[in-house]
Amino acid sequence: MGPIYGKNNKEELPLEHYLARYRQGDPEEMAARCQVPFDGSAFGLTLLGQHFSASFPDYAVTGDRAATNQERILFLRYLLDGRYAPFGGQHLTYREFPWGEVYLQQFTGRCIKRFAFTYGAKPALLRQVMAKLPAVPVERGDVGFRVTLMDELTIDLILWLGDDEFPPNGQILFSDNFRYAFTAEDMANIGDIVLGRMKQLAAEL
């Protein structure tokens, strides 16, 4: 399964490839494998507490707000190749997943450092954003929150505040069932999706 998020990558498969697979797929099988409702014409999906509908077979995505292109692709990837699995009780670092080394550098730069330096001196802003997301506090780091990406797929965002001697630091943990739902590349893009949504909410404050 090749990347479809990037641009101008000679190795990537075009979005049209995945849309063709979707249109030729069995919607009942997708619904059963992913445990998402299908009413005969559309899938019902949730993302960060908001509801979306993805029609079949034309894949028109509508919802509580306009889905971003990354979000549309994420839904597509899940329906085609992901599967539901219950939470096994652990939250893991990106590195701890079997394929975590593949995109670790990109994930660290694009997601963990971005999170830490955006909110490392603004814990009050982080709390305001998380109240709107919505998220629940966790007792990790100086400030920590757990967000639900999709049903039973949760992410912990943990922040250590900066001071005169040390820069801010962060960590992002994924529930262990992510390994069944998404690939390493998907999870790096999930970090972008969550932080992008947080940025939108911050701008609305």
Image (cartoon, grey):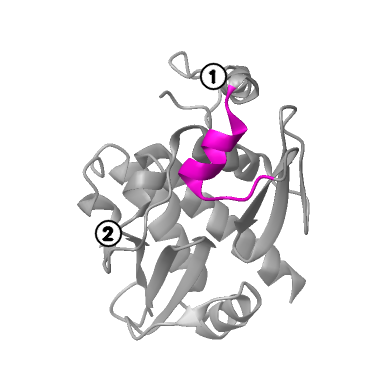
| Residue 81 at x, y percent in the picture | 45, 34
Residue nearest the viewer, comparing 203 with 27:
27
Question: What range of the chain is rendered magenta?
Answer: 25-38
- Residue at image position (37%, 53%) is 85
| Residue 192 at x, y percent in the picture | 52, 51
Note whether 204 is above or below 43 in the view shown.
below
| Residue 136 at x, y percent in the picture | 50, 81
Q: Where residue 93 is drawn, which disc sits there? A: 2
User: Residue 113 falls in which quadrant of the image?
Assistant: bottom left
Please state which of the two labelled residues, at mark 2 or mark 1, is closer to the viewer: 2
The image quadrant where one finds the N terminus is top left
**Which of marks 1 and 2 precedes in the sequence?**
1
Amino acid type, label 1: Asn
Q: Secondary structure at mark 2?
A: strand
Q: Where residue 86 is drawn, which disc sits there? A: none
The image quadrant where one finds the C terminus is bottom right
Amino acid type, label 2: Thr
Instruction: Locate residue 80 relative to residue 164 in the image: left or right.
Output: right
| Residue 73 at x, y percent in the picture | 59, 37
